[in-house]
Image (tube, helix red, strand yellow):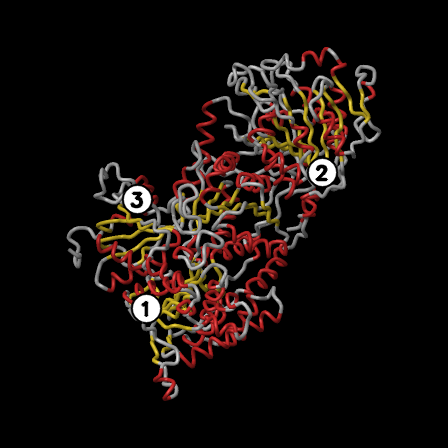
Amino acid sequence: MSCSLFHLAEAEDDRVFEMSDYQGPVARWCSGCGDHSVLTSVQRILTDSQAKPESTVFVSGIGCSSRFPHYLTTYGFHGIHGRALTLATGVKLSRPELDVWVVMGDGDCVSIGAGHWIHAVRYNVDMVALMLDNNIYGLTKKQTSPTTPQGYKSNTQPYGSYLPAMNPLEATLGVTNASFVAQTAEWLPAHLFATLKAAHEHRGFAWVRILQRCPHFTADMYGDVVKDPSRVEMLVHDDGITVPALDKIIEHRVTHDPKDIHRARELAEESEQIRLGLFYRDESRPRYEQTRSLPHHTADEKMAIMQQEFDRYAV
Amino acid sequence: MAIKLDTVGSAEDAGQGRVAPRILETRDHSVEIVSDSGEGAQKCGQIFGSVSAKMGNGVWTVEIIPAEVEPPPRSLAGASGIRIRLGDRPVTNWGDETDLVVAFNEQVLLGRHRLNSLKQGATIVLENMWASHPDEAVRNQWQAAMEELTEAGYHIIGVPMEDLCLTVVDNARKGKNMFALGLLCWIFDRDVDKAKEQIEHAFRKKSQAVVDKNHELLDLGYEWASQNLGFRVQVPTMEAERDMVVMNGNEAIALGAVAAGMELAAMYPITPATSVSHHLGEIFERFGGVLHQAEDEIAAAGVAIGASYAGRCAFTITSGPGLALKTEFLGLAVMTEIPLVLVDVQRGGPSTGLPTKVEQSDLLAAMFGQPGDAPKIILAPATIEECFHSMITARRLAEIFRTVVVVLSDANLATGVAPFHRPELLPEWQGGPPDQSAVPNDGRPYDWDERTGLSDRFIPGRPGGMHTVTGLAHDERSKVAYDSAINERSSAMRSRKLAAFSSTLLPPPVYGDPEGDLLVVGWGSTKGAIEEAVDRVREEGLNVSSLHLTFLSPLPPGLKEIFSRFRKVMTVEINYSDKPGEPFVNEQNRRRGQLSFVLRGTTLVDVDCWTRVLGEPLRPSAIVKAIKENLPEGTAGEES
C-alpha cells in the first residue's frame, strides 16, 4: 500500500476556496460566547491558506467548545472528554499529510485530559492545539475547572474555589520538547487571528491558550481587563506575533525573544497584567511523527519479508 | 532421617563400568525445569521444546512465571521455569502433572510439589550443592525439603551442577540452564546439532564467545548424563507432512497482525499482553508499521482509533485492567463505526488480580463493558495457530462491519509454545489502499443498508465526504440527533450488523457424537484440554461430546438445536462461578460462568457450568473428574 496513493486526489487541483466553503451549519453556541470569534478566525485562516477541506481534520473533545468541528465543512472528529489529543495523534501519525487541528476546553485539556496534554507537548506532533479556556465548565452548568480563579463561586464550590487556579502556560512551558506556546484572548480578534495563524504555520505542536468569557457563567471574569487595556501586556518581538492594529490600544509591551525558554517561563508566571503573545517557539525540536515515518511496501514486498520472519520460526 | 539420593556414579556403576540405561517408552511425557528467576530455566525449556518439535514430537510448553521480576531466591513462590509436554501426536495443552523435573534448588521444587504439579513417583534431577552449603540455615532447609519430597515418593537424583558448570564459566548461575539442556538432550536422545543451532539463534545478539560457552555447557551436561544417569525416555516422533513453525501465542498474534496488513499498533505495557509489542517492536518497522507505546491505556486506544479513522488499519493490545480503561473509547468506536481491533490477553482478575496467570474472565466485560448498547464482535482463538489467523479475521470483520472486534486470547496461549502448520500467506490479507476517491453528490457517511446496517466509510482525504463523526447519537449524515426516533434507528442499525454477520456463520462442529448425555461447551484456550478429557471419558464408554465456540459475539447459529440433542449441557471455563451447595447459593442466585451466563440468556437452555480460577490452565484430568461428577442423573456408566 503506497503512501503516494493518498496524494492522487491532489493532482492538478485548481480549486479556489472561499470562506463559505469552510462554513458549516450556524453554530449553536450562546450569543456572546467567545467560541464564535475563534471559529471565525479559524475559517479566515483556512481561507487565507487555501486549505483543502477534505485534507483538513478538526478533532475535539467534549464541552461547548468541542462542538467546533460540527460548524465547519472539513473532516471532523468530535470525540470523548479529554481524549482529543490522542485521536489527533493517531490521525497525524498515520496520515502526516493531513492538516490537523485540535479544539479543547479547559476541562478537556488540563483536567480530565491532563496526561495527554503533557505527553502531546512532548510528542510535538505537527498540529494546532487550541485550549478554549473560559475558566468554568459551561455545558454542564457552572462547575469549577482547574483554571477557575481562587474564590470564584460555582455550583460545585459554592463558597468559592478552594485552591489557586492552575497556570497552564507555566505547565506547558515546563514540558520537555515544547515547541510553540502562545496565549491570546477572544476579545482581541486581531491578536487571536495573528496567534492562530502563527500556530498554523508552525511545524510542530502549536499549543495556544485562548482566554475566554462564558456569557452565562463567567461573563465578569475578564470584565476589568476588557474595559481596561492597561491590564494587558503584549509580548513583542520581530520573531513573535505582531499585531499592528493593537499598537495604539495596548500600551504595555514587553520585548521577548520567543527562543528564550527561561524568560518565557518567567513571563508565564502570575502577574498583575495578563500577558498575551508568543512565549516560546522552536521549530528544531524533534517531531514524533517524523521519527516514526517509515517506508511503505507493496503487499508482495510484505509477503516476502513475512516469509523471512516465518523462516526464523521454522521447525 | 538420612536422605538417600540416587546418584551419580553409584558404586555399582563405578565398579563395573556403565550398564545400559533403562529406556522408558511413552507416548506422552511432561518435563519441568524450575529455578530462581534469572537462571534461565525458560530459555532452556524453549530450546528443548523447539528441538523436540523439529525432531517431530508434538510439543506444548507453558511458562511458570513468578509475579515479581526477581523474587527472593530459593523461595517457594519464586519458582520460575517452564513445562514442556511432549507427545507422539500434536499436543494441544499442558497436560496434567509433570513426569520429570530438573530443579536448580530444592525450594522452588518444593513450591511445585505443593502446587500438586508433580506426578506421583516423578523423577527429579536436582542441583545438590545446597546439601553441603556453608550456611547452616540452607542445609537445614535442604534437609527439611528432602524429607517432605522423599515422603511424597519422588525419585530424586542429585547432580553437582554448580561444580561442573564452574569448570566452564565463572558464574554458574548463568550456565546451569544450558547444562540442564544437555542433560535433557541425552535423556530424550535429542539431536545435539539441532540444539546447538537453537542456542546460536537464542544468543544471536550476543558474542560468538557466549555462544561457544553455551555449546560447551550443553556438551558437558550431555556427557555427564551419559556417564551417570541410568534412564532415558523415548517419545516416538511423527513425520511432518507439511512445513511447521513453532512459536508462542503472542508471537503468533504479532505475526498475524503483520500478515493482516495492520499498519499501526498502539499499546501501553501490561502483562501478559506486552510481549506482543516486543515481537512487533522487533519486526514491525520492516513492514512500514508503527508501534506506538502510548502514555496510558486510554491514549493507546485513542491513537489506534484516530489512525483507523484516518484510513490506516490499526489495533491496540491490552489485558484486563487496560480493557477497563479503554472502555469509553470502545463505545466511541462502536458509536462512530470506526473499525478497531482490540487484543485482550486475559489474565486473572478483578483489579490487578493475577497478572501472570491465566483466566477467561473478560468475556462479559468485553461484551457488556460499555455503558449503553455497544454491539461488537468478539472472537477467541483456541490455539496458537488460531492466534495468528484470528488477527486476519479480526481485521476483515472490523472493516467490513465498521465496528470493534475484540480478540480474547489469554496468558495460557500467550506463553504457550506449540508447533503448527506454516501458514500459506495471502497478499489479499493486506487489504487494498484506503479509498481516496471523491464522494458522489449527496453521499452520506452512515448510509445504512436497511437489512444489514452496513455503510461505506468516508475517510479524510475523500473530496466531498467532509463530515464530523461524533460520539453523540447521530443520523445518516452524522448530524447530532435531536429526535429520539433517530437514536432508536441508529441503535438498530449498529445492532443489525451483528445479526447480519451471525447469519454468515455455520453452526460449530460437535467434537464426538452429535448427541449424548453431556455436552461440554468451551471457548478460548481450553479447547485442547477439554477435547483430551472428552477423549478419555469416551474411551471409558461415556456419551460425552464437546463444542468449542470461536465467536462469542455474535454467537453462531444452531446452538439451541445442538444443545437439544444432549441430556445436559455444561460449560467448562477458567472464570469464577458459585458452586452448587455453597452457603446461600441456590438455583436462582447462583452466579455462573461467563459463557454459561450468555448461553442461558440466548438459548433458554439450562446450561450448567464447571469453572475454576486456580491461576493455571485447566488440566485434562480435572475436566475428566468434573465431567464424571456432572453427568445427568441416570447416565449409563455414571459414577455414584
Dot 2 surroundings within 10 Å: few (below 14), some, or many (20 or more)? many
Kindly report the distance in space between the C-alpha atoms of the residues bearing marks 2 and 3.
53 Å
Protein chain holding label 3: B
Disc 2 to disc 3: CB gap under 8 Å = no
Disc 1 to disc 2: CB gap under 8 Å = no
Are the residues under marks 1 and 3 on the same chain?
yes
Judge by depth and name the residue closer to the eye, B588 or B43. B43
Residue that numbered label 1 is attached to: B122
Judge by depth and name the residue closer to the eye, B528 or B605. B528
Up-down relation of residue B60 to residue B518 (above or below): below
Kindly report the distance in space between the C-alpha atoms of the residues bearing marks 1 and 2.
64 Å
Judge left or right: residue B75 versus residue B620: right
Judge by depth and name the residue closer to the eye, B518 or A74. B518
Instruction: Look at label 2 and name its amino acid.
Output: Gly
Instruction: Look at label 1 and name its amino acid.
Output: Ala
Judge left or right: residue A144 versus residue B371: right
